[in-house]
Structure formats: C-alpha cells, structure tokens
Image (cartoon, rainbow, N blue to C red):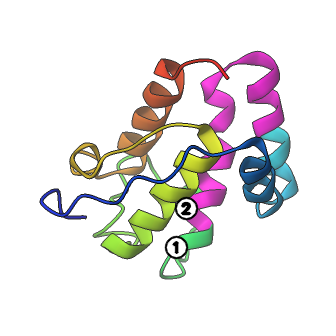
C-alpha cells in the first residue's frame, strides 16, 4: 500500500454489508463477532480477524494461522502482498465499521501489530 496513492473512500458500510461479510466467515468467527457485539470486548474479535486473514492468506503454512506466534510477520513470514493486505483492510473496514488509512497500515508488520491496531480502531470508533 502506497501512502502517496490514497485509496478512494468507500461509502460507509450498512448493516446489510456487514451481514454479507459475516456470512463469508466460518461459524466460529461469526459467533465471536456476536460475542463482541453483545459484550463490546474487542478481544473477542481475534477469531474474526484470523478468519479474515485466512481468507486472503496467499500461501499455505505448515502451521495454522491461529497457532502462529504474535511476532509472525505478515509479509515476510506469511507472504501477504499489498493487494492481499488491501483486501483484508476493506473487509475489516466494512465489518467493523472503521476506517484504516494506508499510512496507518505502514506501521502494521506482525500479527500482534494487526491485532492491537484493529482493537484500538474498533475501541475508538463511534457507537453504531
């Protein structure tokens, strides 16, 4: 993602958009998202985030994504490229009702970076 080439702004996601995105996720991730909506606990989003990453994971790892260490690098270790990361961002923006800039993503390098970043963005967003 190149910060000098900003992404076009997408219209805000509707509840229908979110429902469509949720249908694409495995049952466990949908249940985790429901727990988040009920409790507001952003830690419940981890299975959701891993499911999103898994959908766009460019290569198969010998170790499942959920078992990867927090310092696993998205690009170098998992093989994500800018297109795959852009797809992850679009999906997360629609599902979580947040906005993520290219500049912000330049600081996200590992699984833990991404987890913490998404948790902060979701916590800071205005209530729906």
| Element assignment for label 1 | loop
Q: Which residue is mark 1?
A: 57
Q: Which residues are magenta?
A: 33-54
Q: Is residue 68 left or right of residue 106?
A: right
Residue 121 figure quarter: top left
Instruction: List x then y, in percent, for residue 31.
Output: 85, 41
Residue reaching furthest left?
4
**Residue placed at 47% from the left, 37% from the top?**
118
Nearest the eye: 35 or 17: 17
**Residue placed at 78% from the left, 53% from the top?**
22
Nearest the eye: 58 or 90: 90
| Res. 104 visible in picture | yes
**Residue placed at 67% from the left, 47% from the top?**
48
Q: Which residue is mark 2?
A: 53
Instruction: List x then y, in percent, for residue 75.
Output: 31, 68
| Element assignment for label 2 | helix
Residue 1 figure quarter: bottom left
| Res. 79 visible in picture | no
Asked if labels 2 and 1 touch by Cβ distance under 8 angstroms, the answer is yes
Instruction: List x then y, in percent, for residue 74.
Output: 36, 62
The C terminus: image quadrant: top right
Mark 1 and mark 2: span between their CA atoms?
6 Å
Q: Is residue 107 above or below residue 45?
A: below
Q: Disc count in the image? A: 2
- Residue 49: give its label: none
**Residue placed at 83% from the left, 59% from the top?**
23
Q: Is residue 68 above or below residue 107?
A: below
Q: Is residue 3 left or right of residue 49?
A: left
């Amino acid at each position: 993602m190149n910060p000098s080439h900003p992404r076009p702004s997408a219209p805000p996601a509707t509840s229908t958009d979110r429902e469509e995105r949720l249908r694409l996720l495995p049952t466990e991730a949908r249940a985790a998202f429901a727990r988040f909506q009920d409790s507001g606990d952003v830690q419940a989003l981890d299975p959701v985030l891993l499911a999103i990453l898994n959908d766009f994971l460019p290569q198969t790892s010998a170790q499942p994504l959920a078992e990867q260490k927090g310092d696993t690098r998205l690009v170098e270790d998992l093989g994500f490229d800018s297109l795959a990361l852009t797809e992850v961002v679009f999906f997360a923006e629609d599902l979580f009702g947040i906005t993520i800039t290219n500049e912000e993503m330049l600081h996200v390098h590992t699984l833990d970076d991404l987890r913490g970043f998404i948790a902060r963005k979701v916590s800071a967003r205005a209530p729906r």
